[in-house]
Image (spheres, rainbow, N blue to C red):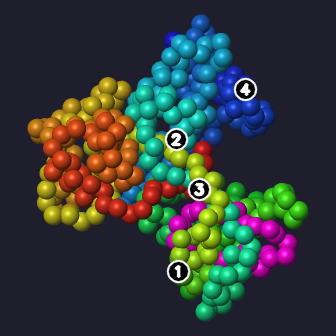
Amino acid sequence: MHIREYTEDDRDAVFRLRRIAFNGTEPSGPLLKPGTHGLVAEIDGRVAGVLGIGSYAQFYGGAAVPMGGIGGVAVDGAYRGRGVANALLDAALVAMREHGQPISALYPTVPTLYRGRGWERAGVFEWVELPMDRLLSVPRPAERIPARPADESDLTALHECYLEVARTIDGMADRRPPRIDLAKVLELDLVSVLPGPNGLRGYLTAERKPGGDMGRLKVLDLIGVDVEAQLNLLASLASWAGTLEAVELRITDPATVNFLGGTPLRHPVLTATWMQRVVDLPAAVAARGWPRLADTAVDVEIIDEHAPWHAGLHRIVVEDGAVRVEPGGTGAVRLHARALGPWFSGAQNTHALRRAGLLEGDPADAVALDQLTGSSGTPRLADFF
């Protein structure tokens, strides 16, 4: 088996595999797109499998940590059972480290495959259905902020508005170009913005979708930097009463639904889980934001046969408000590869990791790892790849 970076010459073979694997239509456009790269596995000169990697970054502790987003993993049916997907994932770990991506995320269709290579569930991607009567019950804003349609001149301010909120929610992507084309947002059916004195106070993006008697409004982003901006945006959705039965809202800011959205006791939520893997522990720790803690150190041993560059004994050191990983220590706490993603994201504490068989060692030292990541709510993404 030979694994290499794919080129535009592989386009037809790659698109064929993905169409068959995901039961979709034939993709259009080039294979190589800005902000992406990928791998193919060849057997006897034929493309037997493919894997794509997108260049993203996720916010943790307010810092954008470069992330390799794995997607489009497909294996030719004739070559299944020969370790093609595992070989691609092993090669992807090396490629992401070389591209300066110390963490990785993916949406798993086959969780056991990715667990075998160190990924583990670490966050959610969610949609909620809001009946119109619930939107109508949301308190009216005290301050009326006139909205207007967005245009090309708003793109930078719109992205900055998103970032102001997203950097406060662990796991959220920073939507950096070139992987994300900011201008694509203007192709949506509804893009309205709330002007403020220094940029935008909020914005809303949505698509009109068929379904039921009156159809649906699928809200992709409802972003407000303060409560009045959020209430104004929710009021704009309520104004669709009479023409819609319900609104589908992609949850970007959980405060919108939990504190303002008027959701009933029981309400439908569509949840997709994503998995995280730490590709390079020292680089990931150096890039992450951390709560300010007293100086301390935790000795860990990393068990990771598929990323040997960070396996072994390390000391996680907190000093003068900064956190770093240096070699050495006693290995008082043993962390398996699958434990690193949920720990790094803050999705699971060390007690849960211990019960799952992914952590062993001194409980007192393990608790110090929990203090490092803190507790800032369920990590979430609002982008699918």
Residue at left 49%, top 70%? 164
The residue lying furthest to the left in this view is 330
Residue at left 27%, top 31%? 303
Residue highlighted by disc 4 = 20
**Disc 1 vs disc 3: Cβ atoms closer than 8 Å?**
no
Crowding near the residue tagged with mark 3, few <14, some 14–19, many ≥20 C-alpha atoms within 10 Å: some
Mark 4 or 2 closer to N-term? 4
Q: Secondary structure at mark 4?
A: helix
Is 156 located above or below residue 238 in the figure?
above
**Disc 2 vs disc 3: Cβ atoms closer than 8 Å?**
no
Name the spot of residue 145 as percent of width and height, x first: 65, 87
Query: Mark 4 belongs to which amino acid?
Result: Ile
Q: Which residues are magenta?
A: 233-256
Residue highlighted by disc 3 = 126
Q: Please name which of the two marks, 3 or 4, marks the residue nearer to the observer.
A: 3
Q: Which mark is residue 106?
A: 2
Residue 163 among magenta residues:
no
Mark 1 or 3 closer to N-term? 3
Report how far apart the C-alphas of labels 3 and 4 lie in the structure: 27 Å
Report how far apart the C-alphas of labels 1 and 4 lie in the structure: 46 Å
Q: Please name which of the two marks, 2 or 3, marks the residue nearer to the observer.
A: 3
Report how far apart the C-alphas of labels 2 and 3 lie in the structure: 15 Å
Q: Which mark is residue 226?
A: 1
Name the spot of residue 66 as percent of width and height, x first: 43, 48
Question: Does the rendering let one see residue 38?
Answer: no
User: 213 or 53: nearer the eye?
Assistant: 213
Q: Secondary structure at mark 1?
A: loop
- Residue 20, image quadrant: top right
